[in-house]
Image (spheres, helix red, strand yellow):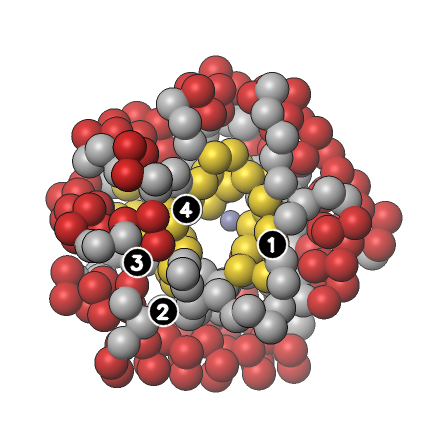
Amino acid sequence: MRRMHLMYHGIHDDASAPGHFDPVYSVTRTRFAHQLDWIAKQEQPERFHVTFDDGDISNVTTALPLLLEHGLLERGMRATFFITGGFINRPGMLRRVDVRTLADAGMCIGAHGMSHGFLEDMDLDSLRRELRDSKSLLEEITGREVDAMALPGGRGGARELEEALACGYRDLYGSRPGPDDEAQPGWRNRIAITRELGDAKFAALANWSGPAARWARLRHGALAVPKRVLGNARYQRLRAALT
Ligand SMILES: [Zn+2]
């Protein structure tokens, strides 16, 4: 079974919704509900893995009730919330009690660094500290093992994977779009779900078929070159200018 990992950030209709509205990554409640309807109708809903990055408060106020309403948990689909340790308890972000609520509801909790700094830009000591501290903080809050991590900004490669596995993680999630690649154990690909994605395009991406999938791969490949050449800080500015 080839799983498709879908990457969300927050569910916000507009800037007045609880949490941090993002014009690119905030998905509306209606769209998110449609997307869950679509997943629920598939033969193997557990093939689709809904994930959330950063720890926005809408993860618990809005996403969790919709996930539970759709009864996907009973059909084997657990969502994963990748939470940045240093963001916990900040305004608009999950509090410790919310992280526990998500875990107690049967959802998976994963790490997303302590500072949200890009791991591939860090020296080895800082990288190891980010991996270790975020894991132990979330384990302390939830009382459960945390064995998955999503790379902040999706940035990282062989060194980050090796260090994550050595630290006790089993899965490292990046941002290369597409299904998992069996040739890379421990590495997980993901598809970014953005606000503008309509129902048909969502289905094409989730099924990894047609021009939507080819375009997602192409765009990711095209952006990887300036990322290497410019370094992450300048790349961020370029990307911001392009979207
Ligand atoms: Zn993030």
Rendered image: mark on residue 194: 3
Mark nearer the N terminus (2 vs 4): 4
As measured in the structure, the alpha-carbon distance from the residue carrying label 2 to the one carrying label 4 is: 22 Å
- Depth check: give the residue in front, 239 or 54: 54
Quarter that holds the C terminus: bottom left
The residue mark sitting in front, 2 or 3, is: 3
Mark nearer the N terminus (3 vs 1): 1
Q: 147 left or right of 192? A: right
- Depth check: give the residue in front, 237 or 84: 84
Circle 4 packing at 10 Å, graded few (<14), some (14-19), many (20+), is many
Mark nearer the N terminus (1 vs 4): 4
As measured in the structure, the alpha-carbon distance from the residue carrying label 2 to the one carrying label 1 is: 26 Å
Element type where label 1 sits in the image = strand
As measured in the structure, the alpha-carbon distance from the residue carrying label 3 to the one carrying label 1 is: 21 Å
Image coordinates for residue 46, horizontal then vertical, percent? 34, 48
Rendered image: mark on residue 243: 2
Element type where label 3 sits in the image = loop
Badge 2 amino acid: Thr
Badge 4 amino acid: Thr
Image coordinates for residue 189, horizontal then vertical, percent? 49, 63
Circle 1 packing at 10 Å, graded few (<14), some (14-19), many (20+), is many
Q: Looking at this rendering, what residue extends furthest in the right direction?
A: 125
The residue mark sitting in front, 2 or 1, is: 1
